[in-house]
């Protein structure tokens, strides 16, 4: 039985029945969008930049008949500039909107906001923490493009340490059977031990390597993510690794038949434009699936 989500802060909140229900809803809304959220208002509060997440949530809300109020650059144009704490901003915006979609620059926002939340809050990325709606759309992309989620090998290449998309997707994959994840990164950017402990507890096999050339041919899914420059301790470290994992046509051609190349985007220095026409390149479709998944999520939480 599907479990109705009040808030969405982390990917572990989804159970398999709810994921299945959200996927069915996303697919039916693609074919037959309904104005089920007429009269509802969504506030998007973004303290970090975004193209896909904010605009796809806003488009999703409008397509479902709802309305949107938005602060796209909260750190410079909201009362955060005057020093207003996040908790007070959430208290206020909760009086103006039926749901809040929040991107914030620090992780663990659930601890701060759960005690005061009076309307549903969706975490749209909290620092280097999580990005659960991204993980759901990533999983939906795998489901749509591969036709299965169990029994897959996923190469996650780039910056597993800082990427909230990688963290959330790894947590979600932990709910499926016979999953192998190969984290490809230099040691300084490798995945944190707490997530590996979670994978151990959920029967996910994993490996860590820095060698993409050796790993890429084993993957059913290659999940590329950019180096998160804004979270690096030093510019020197970023410069050292920024072009380490360029996926060009020769590298993409090492992927096995039927495998898919995903990226939460932006692609920044990671995938050459010549790769876009290859059959394995699904990253633009992935962004479109994000619209469907966010429609389903809003309808599920609010309708
Ligand atoms: N994938 C993603 O979160 O993109 P944006 O930063 O553009 O929202």
Image: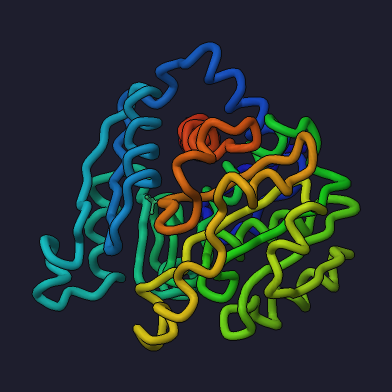
Percent position (x, y) of residue 193? 70, 83
Residue 295 visible (yes or no): no
Q: Is residue 50 left or right of residue 271?
A: left
Percent position (x, y) of residue 113? 41, 68
Give the residue displayed 32% in from the left and 46% down from the top: 51
Q: Is residue 82 above or below residue 49?
A: below
Q: State the residue in front, 227 or 101.
A: 227
Give the residue displayed 22% in from the left and 46% down from the top: 70
Give the residue displayed 40% in from the left and 78% down from the top: 239
Percent position (x, y) of residue 299? 49, 31
For residue 93, which quarter of the picture? bottom left
Q: Is residue 292 left or right of residue 173?
A: left
Q: Is residue 24 above or below residue 245?
A: above
Q: State the residue in front, 4 or 166.
A: 166
For residue 97, which quarter of the picture? top left
Percent position (x, y) of residue 34? 46, 16
For the view shown, which residue lies furthest in the front direction?
250
Q: Quadrant of the N terminus?
A: top right
Q: Is residue 121 above or below residue 30?
A: below
Q: State the residue in front, 160 or 103.
A: 160
């Amino acid at each position: 039985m599907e479990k109705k989500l009040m808030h969405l802060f982390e990917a572990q909140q989804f159970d398999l029945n709810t994921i299945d229900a959200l996927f069915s809803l996303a697919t039916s809304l693609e074919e037959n969008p309904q104005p089920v959220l007429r009269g509802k208002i969504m506030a998007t509060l973004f303290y970090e930049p975004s193209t896909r997440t904010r605009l796809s949530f806003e488009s999703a809300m409008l397509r479902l008949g709802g309305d949107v109020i938005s602060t796209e650059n909260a750190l410079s144009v909201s009362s955060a500039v005057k020093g207003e704490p996040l908790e007070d901003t959430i208290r206020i915006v909760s009086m103006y909107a039926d749901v809040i979609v929040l991107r914030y620059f620090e992780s663990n926002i659930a601890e701060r906001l759960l005690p005061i939340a009076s309307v549903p809050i969706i975490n749209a990325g909290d620092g280097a923490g999580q990005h659960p709606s991204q993980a759901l759309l990533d999983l939906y992309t795998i489901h749509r493009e591969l036709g299965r989620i169990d029994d897959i090998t996923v190469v996650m290449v780039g910056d597993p340490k800082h990427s909230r998309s990688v963290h959330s997707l790894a947590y979600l994959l932990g709910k499926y059977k016979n999953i192998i994840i190969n984290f490809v990164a230099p040691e300084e950017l490798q995945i944190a031990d707490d997530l590996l402990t979670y994978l151990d507890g959920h029967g996910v096999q994993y490996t860590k390597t820095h060698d993409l050339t050796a790993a890429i041919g084993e993957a059913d899914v290659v999940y590329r993510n950019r180096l998160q420059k804004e979270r690096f301790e030093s510019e020197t470290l970023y410069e050292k690794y920024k072009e380490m994992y360029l996926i060009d046509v020769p590298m993409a051609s090492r992927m096995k038949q039927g495998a898919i190349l995903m990226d939460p985007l932006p692609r920044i220095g990671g995938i050459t434009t010549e790769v876009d026409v290859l059959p394995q390149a699904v990253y633009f479709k992935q962004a479109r699936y994000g619209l469907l998944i966010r429609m389903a999520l809003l309808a599920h939480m609010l309708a």
